[in-house]
Amino acid sequence: MSVSLWVLLGVGLAVFFWGVGAYNRLVRLKNGIANAFGQIDVQLKRRYDLIPNLVEVARKYLAHEAQTLEAVIAARNQARTAEQTAAASPLNAGALGALAGAEQMLGGALGRLFAVAEAYPDLKADQNMRELSEELSSTENRIGFARQAYNDNVLEFNDAAAQFPTLIVARLFNFVPQAMLESTTSEAERQTLRIEI
């Protein structure tokens, strides 16, 4: 064999192993996105489990505010359904968009519940209500951190898939850019949910 054939074979093997490495890195990053969504999923389920307890405590005091309580439960159920759909396909931009919309509706319903609760001193003084409110507030913070971790994973994946020469492997194997999770779309929605009981 000639030297040029050995050089060509060496270059071919180097390109092959580089391609395998790039492919494996993209797969690892894509799996990291799914794992990060799993962390969001855990916190969302925790929140969905807290909401019925919160509504039950409030129901004792807000008997004539049944519409507000029903709106919270309906929004919670819709968000949970959207969460289950997104959990089944965490890389589906449509499912993530539906989840974000349902979460916005749930945030609005909870905001209205807490606004109504402000007018009831007995409800504000209820120990269970205060504990549930604190737990919900803590969960909201955890959800925020989990969303940030998800978006960090998406950014890392998208950067890797868009940079040359990994871009070649990404295009060959259909690694498409992933969508960031946006919890808000307008300035009004960016206002913090205030839980004061």
Image: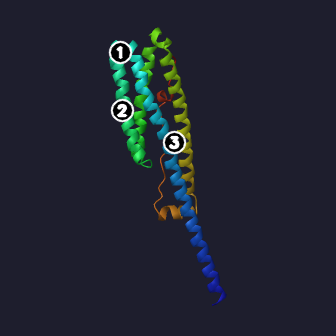
The answer to whether residue 194 is visible is no
The residue located at (43%, 33%) in the rendering is 103
Q: Mark 1 or 3 closer to N-term?
A: 3
The residue to which callout 3 is attached is: 39
Q: Residue furthest bottom?
A: 1
Task: Measure the C-alpha gap from mark 2 to mark 3.
Answer: 20 Å
Question: Residue 90, image x and y in percent?
Answer: 44, 47
What residue lies at 51% left-to-right and 48% top-to-bottom? 35
Give x and y (percent) for residue 135. Answer: 52, 26
Q: Is residue 131 above or below residue 169?
A: above
* Circle on res. 65: 1
Q: Which residue is drawn at 35% across and 15% down?
A: 65
> Could you say whether the residue bearing mark 1 is in a helix, strand or loop?
helix
Viewer-nearest of discs 1 and 3 = 3
Q: Note whether 84 is above or below 186 in the view shown.
A: below
Label 2 vs 1, first from the N-terminus: 1
Q: In which quarter of the image is the N terminus?
A: bottom right
How far is the residue under mark 2 from the one under mark 1?
A: 19 Å
Total label count?
A: 3
In the structure shown, which secondary structural element does the residue marked by tag 2 occupy?
helix
- The structure residue drawn at horizontal position 50% and vertical position 11%, both measured from the top left corner, is 125
> Badge 2 local density, few (<14 within 10 Å), some, or many (20+)?
some
Label 2–label 1 contact, CB within 8 A: no
The residue identified by callout 2 is 77
Mark 3, Cα crowd under 10 Å, few <14 / some 14-19 / many 20+, is some
Q: What residue type is labelled 1?
A: Glu
- The answer to which of 43 and 53 lies nearer the viewer is 53
N-term mark: 2 or 3: 3
Can residue 163 be seen from the camera position used here?
A: yes
Colour scheme: rainbow
